[in-house]
Amino acid sequence: MNVDLNQMMTSTYNKTFYVRSYVKFNGSVYYGNEITFKSAGYIGGSGGYIFYDKGEVTNGWRYLEAPATKLNDPGSNNFQWSTVTGFLSNIQTEIGTGKENSLIIKAANNYTNIAAAMAIYNSVNNVNDWFLPSLNELKELYKLKKVGLIFSPSSGSNSYYNKTVLSSSQYSQDSCYGIDFETGAQVVLSKTLRVYSGWQIRRL
């Protein structure tokens, strides 16, 4: 039997799955090790939602967790990727790179209106190891929206723009990646336009 794990992860939530491989050979059945993984929606250590499980601890982490609400700045809920255009070295799109991306962005743009910097600064439930997700991490985060655990961040007169959540990944010297949280579409955005939303995540 073939199992579509991606479909299972997005159609169910807050579940623990147990998977064991097997092979039939010469009339005998041989089993592999049992592994477990959690679907999106499991409650994490800070009270947020687990939205990604890589199946084992590597490089010091296994899960990605997100709070139930978008990133907030006391002065404004709208963020930009950077204050100036320019291509930053070592920025990546893959899962497991959002934290490093955020530190690189913060080092070059240490301002509260910068999504990556504010994600690092902002504490949630007395936990302060948050960062801005990479593009592929943000795609995984959108699964929480699909199952109804988080909602579109659009609000106020700027709702046309702030329904889009910034990633910490860049497209070019003047553009970055984001996800439209009403459709799930991947979009390319201006790095310096301060109209978008941010969403923190953390590793554990």
Image (spheres, grey):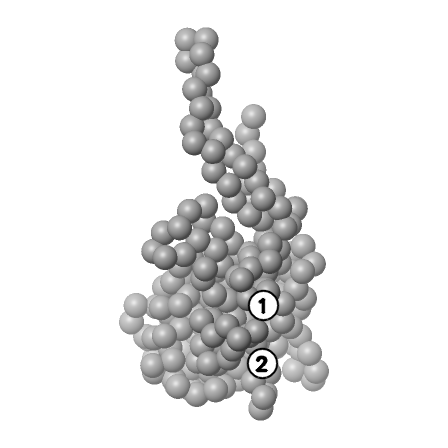
Identify the image quadrant of the C terminus: bottom left
- Identify the residue at image location x=60%, y=54%: 42
Please rate how many residues cluster around mark 2, counting C-alpha atoms within 10 Å: few if below 14, some from 14 to 19, many from 20.
Answer: some
Rendered image quadrant of residue 154: bottom right
Q: Can residue 138 be seen in this view?
A: yes
Percent from the top left, x then y, of residue 2? 55, 29
- Residue 106 numbered mark, or none: none
Question: Quick check: 72 left or right of 149?
Answer: left
- Identify the residue at image location x=66%, y=64%: 150
Where is mark 1, residue-wise?
67
Q: Residue furthest left?
A: 89
- Identify the residue at image location x=44%, y=24%: 31
Structural distance between the alpha carbons of marks 2 and 1: 11 Å
- Identify the residue at image location x=40%, y=50%: 57
Where is mark 2, residue-wise?
72
Q: Can residue 170 be seen in this view?
A: no
Please rate how many residues cluster around mark 1, counting C-alpha atoms within 10 Å: few if below 14, some from 14 to 19, many from 20.
Answer: many
Percent from the top left, x then y, of residue 45? 53, 62
